[in-house]
Amino acid sequence: TLPDIKGDVRFDNIVFEYEKGRPALKGISLEAKAGESIALVGHTGSGKSTIINLLCRFYDPVEGRVLVDGYDIRDVTLQSLRSQVGIVLQDTFIFSGSIRDNIRFGRLEATNEEIEAAAKAVHAHDFIVKLPDGYDTQVEERGNMLSMGQRQLLSFARALLANPRVLILDEATASIDTETEQKIQQALKTLLIGRTSFMIAHRLSTIRGADKIVVLDHGNIMEEGTHDEL
Ligand code: ATP
Ligand code: MG
């Protein structure tokens, strides 16, 4: 079991291939200190999602190690890893059920107060209370009655409630209006406080806000630095 972590993450000389002889990562070393936010950028196929797949342990590296607070993630239970390393995916996952259950997402011990506090913190509360049955409004799997921006805010509320020390974010590419964009940026800031984060960032504002930008190219790190340095 992984003990409670601070959130230091280290990729130590990672080589990975999905298919033999075709490396997707060619010796990546990368470090995030607890609380730091890292934006992963690079062309399609450069390895951004692969880095995240390894941190979630969807795959194991061919060479090298992924360390969380110094623990090799291969040596801890998946359950204990998942409770402290959370992910917000691009295609925000909504299931059939109430808004409340969608934020709660299996955390049965969460109270209504905690759920609403999380929604308020990421400015999702405002739109939720305007829905026909507020937090009890039923949504469908495809989440058709919710806009992209609303779905994003809902997924932030879910992540905030889950409260992982390390947060992975695959930012949506869908275009949203300026007002929603600002709301999302604010919510994101709140969500990232006190967490280590890895973001596949598409929006310039997100990239600018990151502590470190890592530019990937064909499975290598090409550049690494702050927005001002690059
Ligand atoms: P994008 O911006 O398009 O999401 P990415 O930077 O996330 O790109 P990856 O998905 O990490 O890129 O892909 C890195 C390399 O690994 C690419 O050459 C890709 O074709 C290959 N790859 C990714 N997923 C798989 C898979 N499931 N099976 C085989 N090869 C894969
Ligand atoms: Mg990808």
Image: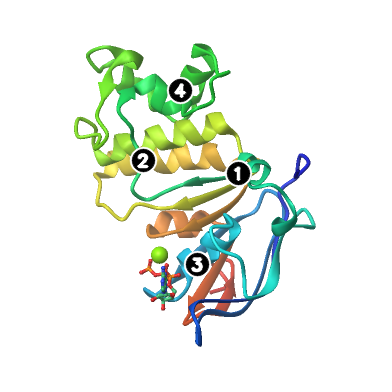
Q: Which residue is mark 2?
A: 93
Of the two numbered discs 1 and 3 on the same chain, state the one appearing first in sequence.
3
| SS type, badge 4 | helix
Residue drawn at x 55%, y 63% as measured from the top left: 59
**Res 12 seen here:** no
| Location of the N terminus (image quadrant) | top right
Q: Is residue 213 left or right of residue 177?
A: right
Q: Image height check: is 105 above or below 215?
A: above
**For the residues bearing labels 3 and 2, Cβ distance under 8 angstroms:** no
Q: Position of residue 106 (x, y in %)?
A: 50, 27
Cα separation between marks 1 and 3: 17 Å
The residue under label 1 is which amino acid type? Arg
Of the two numbered discs 1 and 2 on the same chain, state the one appearing first in sequence.
1
Q: Which of these two is toward me, 79 or 139?
A: 79
Q: Is residue 84 left or right of residue 93?
A: right
| SS type, badge 3 | helix
Of the two numbered discs 4 and 1 on the same chain, state the one appearing first in sequence.
1
Q: Which residue is mark 3?
A: 50
Q: Is residue 204 left or right of residue 133?
A: right
Q: Is residue 114 left or right of residue 4?
A: left
Residue drawn at x 57%, y 54% as measured from the top left: 56
Distance from mark 3 CB to nearest ligand 1 atom below 8 Å = yes
Cα separation between marks 4 and 3: 33 Å
Q: Which residue is mark 1?
A: 82
Q: Residue furthest front?
A: 20
Dot 2 surroundings within 10 Å: few (below 14), some, or many (20 or more)? Answer: some
Q: Image height check: is 105 above or below 152?
A: above
Cα separation between marks 3 and 2: 20 Å
Residue drawn at x 51%, y 79% as measured from the top left: 219
Q: Which residue is mark 4?
A: 120
